């Protein structure tokens, strides 16, 4: 079965500055090189889903500028339906500046632009698309109020909702009630629960706290260590595949997008979907850039026979 995945999220043009090491406060350093590419958490997740075979559509917003055209064209290259990507006449297309050091670690600064200017009215124009989906994904680079409206509609029609609370911020009232699965990384999970993530016990404590907050299905990604999962019936840890990282920029987004292409709506195959997602993200971190680094299903199968 091919999942129908809809991503409600951000579209950013990424500028990556390649440096030897991260600057200290007040320090000026020289970049070795600069690259521009399509990105944004939403775009990365959608492309990862599409390249893993999901029938993928996007709900988002760009500015009335050349970067907006660039982002829409980038989605179309992967066969993603962009009929629900709006044009904002006031705010520019989102952008990000990424500092990437020689160890493959990054720091990212994001300008929300048209992404953050989205209004809840866009969901009324996307009702038919959401109703027809199997999976709806959203993150926090677009307004939570818009995600809430989309998730409420999705739950009315049996669509499975996945929330990536990144960048982490206080979750608005009601959103978790219409979320089926929440997928933070270890830092985001600790920010939201107040419990540091450093071992299995602390992950279990995070799961218990999220359950108190109203969400019982949880995945915590912990970088090159792997991913923890918890559902009312099961929990466990899926280790990452050991590789040498060049650029971790889109690793988490690749993980979520690839996962969405494989997961059953009732989450019954969560461990198998997590293994597939780990394979996808392990390839991403060995490449440079956001969208350019995301593998296809064929590449994943070839790498992990």
Image (spheres, rainbow, N blue to C red):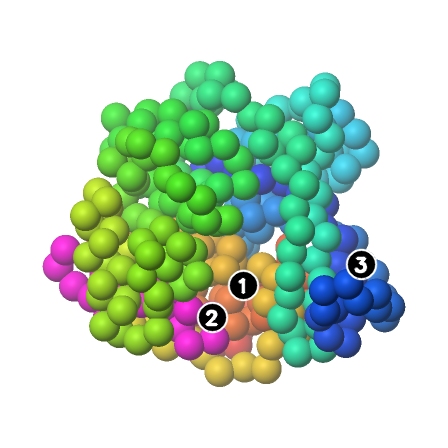
User: Is residue 270 depicted above or below 120 in this figure?
Assistant: below
Give the residue at the far front of this rendering.
26
Q: CA distance from mark 1 to mark 3?
A: 18 Å
Q: Residue visible at 68% across and 22% down?
A: 88
Q: Earlier in the sequence, mark 1 or mark 3?
A: 3
Q: Is residue 27 magenta?
A: no
Query: Residue tagged by mark 1?
Result: 251
Badge 3: few (under 14), some or many (20 or more) residues near its Cα, within 10 Å? few
- Residue 242, given in percent of the width and then of the height, sits at 49, 82
Q: Is residue 164 left or right of residue 101?
A: left
Residue beneath disc 2: 223
- In the image, is 187 to the left or to the right of 152? right
| Displayed quadrant of residue 16 | bottom right
Q: Whole-Å distance between the Cαs marked 1 and 2?
A: 8 Å
Can residue 49 be seen by looking at this rendering?
no
Please state if 80 lies on the left or on the right of 128 as rendered: right
Q: How many marks?
A: 3
Name the foreground residue: 197 vs 223: 197
Q: Is residue 162 above or below residue 158?
A: below
Q: Which residue is mark 3?
A: 35
- Asked which secondary structure carries label 3, the reply is strand
Instruction: Look at the image and give the residue range highlighted in magenta.
Output: 219-236
Q: Earlier in the sequence, mark 1 or mark 2?
A: 2
Determine whether label 1 and label 2 are within 8 Å by CB. yes
Q: Residue at x 70, y 58 (%)?
A: 98
Q: Is residue 26 above or below residue 83?
A: below
Q: Tell me where residue 268 sits by quadrant.
A: bottom left
Which one is earlier in the sequence, the residue at label 2 or at label 3? Answer: 3
Mark 1, Cα crowd under 10 Å, few <14 / some 14-19 / many 20+, is: many
């Amino acid at each position: 079965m091919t999942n129908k995945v809809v991503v409600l999220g951000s579209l950013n043009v990424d500028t990556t500055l390649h440096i030897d090491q991260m600057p200290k406060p007040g320090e000026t350093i020289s970049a070795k090189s600069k690259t521009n590419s399509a990105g944004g958490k939403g775009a990365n997740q959608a492309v990862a889903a599409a390249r893993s075979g999901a029938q993928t559509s996007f709900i988002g917003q760009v500015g009335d500028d050349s970067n907006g055209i660039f982002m829409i064209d980038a989605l179309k290259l992967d066969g993603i339906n962009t009929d629900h990507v709006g044009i904002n006449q006031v705010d520019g297309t989102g952008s990000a500046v990424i500092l990437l050091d020689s160890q493959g670690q990054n720091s990212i600064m994001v300008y929300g632009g048209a992404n953050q200017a989205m209004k809840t009215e866009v969901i009324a124009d996307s009702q038919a698309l959401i109703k027809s989906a199997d999976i709806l994904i959203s993150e926090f680079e677009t307004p939570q109020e818009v995600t809430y409206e989309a998730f409420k509609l999705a739950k009315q029609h049996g669509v499975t909702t996945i929330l990536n609370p990144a960048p982490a911020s206080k979750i608005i009232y009601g959103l978790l009630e219409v979320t089926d699965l929440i997928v933070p990384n270890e830092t985001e999970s600790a920010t939201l629960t107040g419990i540091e993530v450093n071992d299995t016990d602390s992950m279990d404590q995070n799961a218990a706290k999220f359950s108190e907050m109203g969400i019982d299905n949880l995945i915590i990604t912990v970088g090159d260590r792997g991913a923890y999962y918890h559902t009312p019936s099961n929990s466990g840890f899926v280790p990452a595949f050991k590789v040498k990282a060049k650029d971790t920029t889109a690793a988490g987004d690749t993980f979520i997008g690839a996962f969405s292409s494989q997961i059953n709506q009732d989450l019954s195959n969560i461990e198998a979907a997590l293994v597939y997602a780990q394979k996808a993200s392990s390839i991403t971190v060995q490449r440079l850039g956001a969208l350019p680094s995301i593998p296809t299903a064929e590449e994943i199968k070839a790498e992990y026979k």
